[in-house]
Image: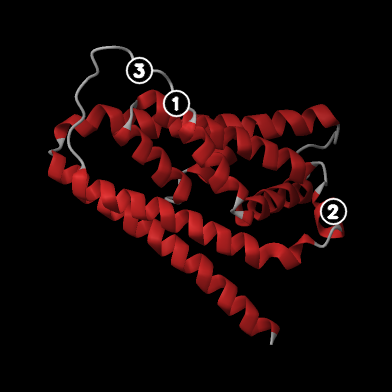
Amino acid sequence: MYILIGLLIGFLAAIPLGPVNVFVISQVLKRDFLHGFMAGITAAVLDTIYCLVAIFGLSQVTFGLNLVKFLPFFKVFAALVLGILGFRMYQQSKTYTEPQPPKNMTSFSPRPMLGVVLLYVVNPSLYAFWLAVAGMVSHYNWMASGVGSARIFFAVSCGLGGIVWYFVLTYYVVTHHHQFQPTTFQKIFLVLAIILFVFSAYTVASIFFRSLKLL
């Protein structure tokens, strides 16, 4: 039962349009299905790790080290990363042309996966989400046995749910993007850039509003 719940949670958690989904879509459009899907798999693997850390209670270690005071610095760095990604997409919205199929097979680049890792590292709200999931799992006693294997299977099922979503997303983008003109893609990149700029501004604003509450 908890495996099905984990699949559902992982799938639904990956759907909202955020920086990761924006980044995955951009990799499909700029590169190909493989790079976009590998970026999605990287996100799902990190979700699995975050879920495991939360379920096994390592969050107590985090709070014991009093890392909360460094949260504004993480948010500033996150806003900077999102702003840089948004600026790059804005530049691509001005110069995008329909890519031609390469004559020779191009090598796989790990840059999309590294980009996802960076987005996760600078976004503490993702860890907070999995802490909430861990609390919900404990509250409803979905894993009555409480053994370590059940916790691991639940976390892995959450990751698999995310992989299902990213496969659907990347497959849809790669199979439908040929129906659009290059100018349409320029507009898409512009919208994606605006979304990232909004996330960046929101991150900075959250630091300001948090400081007001502490006054």
Q: Earlier in the sequence, mark 2 or mark 1?
A: 2
User: What's the residue at 85%, 53% (across, down)?
Assistant: 60
Query: Separation of disc 2 and disc 1 at Cα?
Result: 37 Å
Q: Earlier in the sequence, mark 3 or mark 2?
A: 2
User: What's the residue at 59%, 62% (across, down)?
Assistant: 75
Left or right: residue 145 versus residue 68 is: right
Q: Residues within 10 Å of mark 3 (few under 14, many from 20)?
A: few
Query: Separation of disc 3 and disc 1 at Cα?
Result: 9 Å
Reading the image, the residue beneath label 2 is 60
- Of marks 3 and 2, the one in the foreground: 3
State the image quarter where residue 155 is shown: top right
User: What's the residue at 38%, 35% (across, down)?
Assistant: 169
How far from the left and from the top, in percent, is residue 170?
37, 31
Q: Is residue 160 above or below residue 103?
A: below
Q: Residues within 10 Å of mark 2 (few under 14, many from 20)?
A: few
Q: Which mark is residue 106?
A: 3
Disc 3 marks a residue whose amino acid type is Thr
Instruction: For mark 1, give the secondary structure.
Output: loop
Residue 4 in view in this figure: no
Left or right: residue 123 versus residue 40 is: right
Residue 126 in view in this figure: yes
- CB within 8 Å, label 3 to label 2: no
Instruction: For mark 2, give the secondary structure.
Output: helix
Disc 2 marks a residue whose amino acid type is Gln
State the image quarter where residue 142 is shown: top right
- Quadrant for the N terminus, please: top right
How far from the left and from the top, in percent, is residue 181?
12, 38
